[in-house]
Amino acid sequence: MDQEQNGRSFVVTRRSFIKGAGAGVAGAAVVGGSAAIDSNTEAEAQGGGQRIGPGPVRMTLNINGVNRTVEVEPRTTLINVLRGVGHRPLSPDQALTGSKVGCDRGSCGACTVMVDGKAVYGCMMLAADARGRKILTVEGLSQTGKLTAIQQQMVEKDGYQCGFCTPGFVMSLTALMRRKANPTLDEVKMAVSGNTCRCGTYPRIFEAALAAAKMNAAPARKGA
Amino acid sequence: MQQKTKKIKSVVVENGFEKEVEIEVPVGPPASWGDPKALRLLGKRNTRPDGPDKVTGRARYASDVILPGMCYGRFVMSPYPAAKIKSIDLGPAERINGVKAAVLLLQPGADVLYHGQPVAAIAAITPEIAEDAIRAVRVEYETRPHVVDLVKATNPNAPKVRSDVPSNVQYPGGSTKGDVDGALKSAAAMIHETYEAQTRLHCCLETHGHTVKWDGDKLTVWASTQFVTGVRDEFARDTGGPQNVTVITEHMGGGFGSKFGRGTEGIAVAQLAKKANAPVKFLLSRAEEQLANYRGPGVRAEIKLGASADGTLTVGDVKVWNNGGASNANSPLDQGFYIIEPQARRVQRWGVLTNTGGTAALRAPGHPQAAVIWDMALDALAAKLNMDPLEFRKKNHNDPVRVAEWDLGAKVIGWNRRQRTPGSAAGTRKRGVGMGSATWGGGGSKSADCTIEIKPDGKVRAYSAVQDLGVGVRLYVQSIPAEELGLQLADVEPIIGHSTFGPGKGSGGSTTTASVAPAIKMSAVQAREQLAIVAAKKLGAKPEEIEVVPRGRFQVKGSPARGLAWKELCALLPPSGIKAKGDWNEASDLQASGVRGCTFVEVEVDTETGKVTVIKALGVQDCGFVLNRLQAENQVTGGIIQGIGTAILEDRRMDNVTGRMLNPNFEDYKLCGSFESGGVNITLDPPYRTLGPEERGIATIIFDNPTGKVSGIGEPAIIGVQSAVANAIFNAIGVHVKEQPATPDRVLAALASLKGGRA
């Protein structure tokens, strides 16, 4: 499947390799340069990756528009750092636990966040690979307190039950609607094809997404 | 005539001090939810108050709690399905920098009975280090022969799963009614088939676990649980009593029957936190979750079913094997039928031991398994009789509510579009329609308390210890008092999921709503009665003359000018306000047990690939008095989607050679995703229309069975779905997928068997 179509970036394979290869040791990691936005795969292909670690390293991440500095092992995933894991982690009041961990291996999408505008599995990207990029989490969507169209419609249509998957669905749909304000049902299905709702509320999530799309299409309303 | 009175508790101010007193109030009419048409809030499609928290990430789950200095727990699990532990050395793990505690969960000499059984647990300052540590633990096992397959386990020469019992085939039982052998001989049509419903995993998106913190002897537990106060009582074993444990479950990420106790992970986390002298978060990893204990047991049944020429189900002869792992397991098929009962019947049942771990209730435990097996048998026999499967059922069952639900479901799905002869459609993509039925209890009992607190500033809070698994408990905790007191939803703050709020209620058997909602109703009635006394005193009237009208105005019946606005009334309350707690004796009449429900599904089967696509599905479900239609419909939606997954995807697979689970993850244990779930939600209101031939989606109808009493429906909503899909496939291709689920390979094998090939 076309990765772009799914809206997820291409860090999947590399992270699973690094995370798996780190078995038993606090592994060093080869990561893209912090300023080399969107050129990680290229840098790696040229053998130009930067070696960091082993052991905890300081890194600064731009999360919801704010720079935060943490000290974590290079093998630490973006989702774990966001959720307050690390040797010198985000403080409890800075940690962002809206995005969840459901499977920790790129199957369920509970950890979905946006990195440079694309929906990404937070469990499949190393935190170090998110340096120099713009990370947006569910907490960053409605900082003024006003729900976005997607969020509002999820509430209206009861597009959840336990709610554990909800932030991930919201982020996948937000990424979709920022690409395409008025998607079709098939595009909605494709956008959330990497998200699992165990309570089985997909039909209501689709309904919410299409209703939000209609709000977006109405000229008076602003986008998702 | 002397008016009857009753005593209720209230608070008064005496000499500047508040004092709890008993006050006498007139006995009102018996508790009733009232005429649905006259209600402002209940029974409508209102949205839940915690929705904004869920969509913004503010909702806090046990896995979200972060405490300073917190460590992370992990299990050391057995890689073998059958072994004796010779030795365990935690030392290499304990020496890793960042590991704070390690505890044994099994002692040397203990038997391991399944792959993934927890042996020890580790806590470390990061989950990554905890994972290093579990790999460093040295466990020496003496492996034994194992058996993981249900049929293989019944072989007398199979390895014994447990050394204390002589055979794996255990827990025999059965019953006979009528002349079975005679009826089998005289039947005009017969089937003799073997069916198997698979073992499934719960797959709660939030895994099992807790975040815990010791303060001396006191323990605070943030639990992902279906039973806040039950978990409190289990942790009380470590603390010298329940008074030293506080359990908090503001939100929890799914349970489906698997999250009643604290589990081995709960035993471990309390020990780890004590030993580490630090808070510990131990939410299972996905692999731990899938392996460690919880499965919905599979069922295999050999069925002979016979009918007379007019379609009367004369006889059933049934053998049932339940896959209990290391212990017994049950299903309703143990009684020899599901819903549709043969005139004469015989059943023999066993629980079969396998090296596959323990079982747990899984959303209507045993029912979907019993239903899919029985419904496949019924449709196979209906086909032999050349009879419409719905007419066949109606010939043999006459519960008026169920028959009405069947008829409505048939009309809405477009039952007449089914193939008259199963498998008769032309082309390679074949459509079919099928149905399945449910039976459930869903009644309540005296269990949870609800306290309503009203302050002089007019604020209303409703408290209950009960947890919300996702059905929308906060909404009815909010809307019942709001309805009773004439207020708006936002005027009442619902606060739940805390063990200090009085007796709680385990969310099992779809009994939560029917237990909690009546308790809230009676508390609300009592709050209204207390307020009426205050209002009456001020207005110079009798309490029984006071009526409540919208916006919380309490006024004298017949002279609306004599009244108090909500704020004026509350300003008259003592400084700490009033508290009301209802009496279950009066509430019990507000709930009832006994719901039905049915599912109709249209599928398309691609006979070249074996892929099954659900075109549309409809759930029809009665639940008595509807507290909130939107959430009730959502429960049915969720049941349908989980049921579709059960029918075509979900299957816990064991490897016979190694005895290991092959799919302890979400990649190979497939759940319904966006492309399997059949399209958008279709909301239907009376008069109900027939869905169009090409209309796709998931439709729900809360069937209006005006009992005036509340019943739960979380579980019945899933029961008939696998049946309906299995029979829709049969209707499309003319052969059942007898070993469930209907994955493409099995569909192709079934098609091959039809052509005379090997199944």
Image: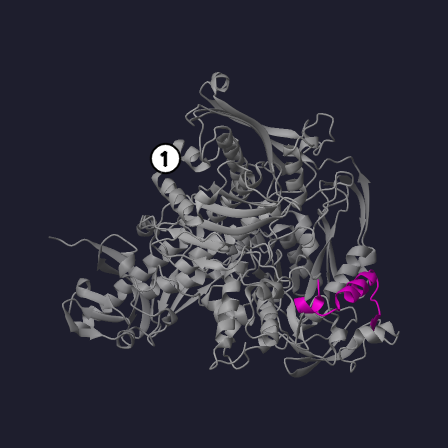
Q: What is the x, y in percent for residue B322?
A: 60, 35
When the figure is inspected, residue B254 is found, relative to residue B315, above or below; the finding is below
Q: Which residue is mark 1?
A: B398
Q: Is residue A107 left or right of residue B56?
A: right
When the figure is inspected, residue A61 is found, relative to residue B48, above or below; the finding is below
A21 drawn magenta: yes
**Residue toward you, B637 or A105:** B637
- Quadrant where the C terminus of chain B lies? top right
**Residue toward you, B387 or B589:** B387
Host chain of mark 1? B
| One can see residue A44 in this view | yes
Q: Is residue B403 left or right of residue B56?
A: left
Q: Give the magenta range.
A: A1-30
When the figure is inspected, residue B314 is found, relative to residue B663, above or below; the finding is above
Q: In the rendered structure, which amino acid carries the disc numbered 1? A: Asn
Residue farthest along the right direction in this orientation: A47
B479 drawn magenta: no
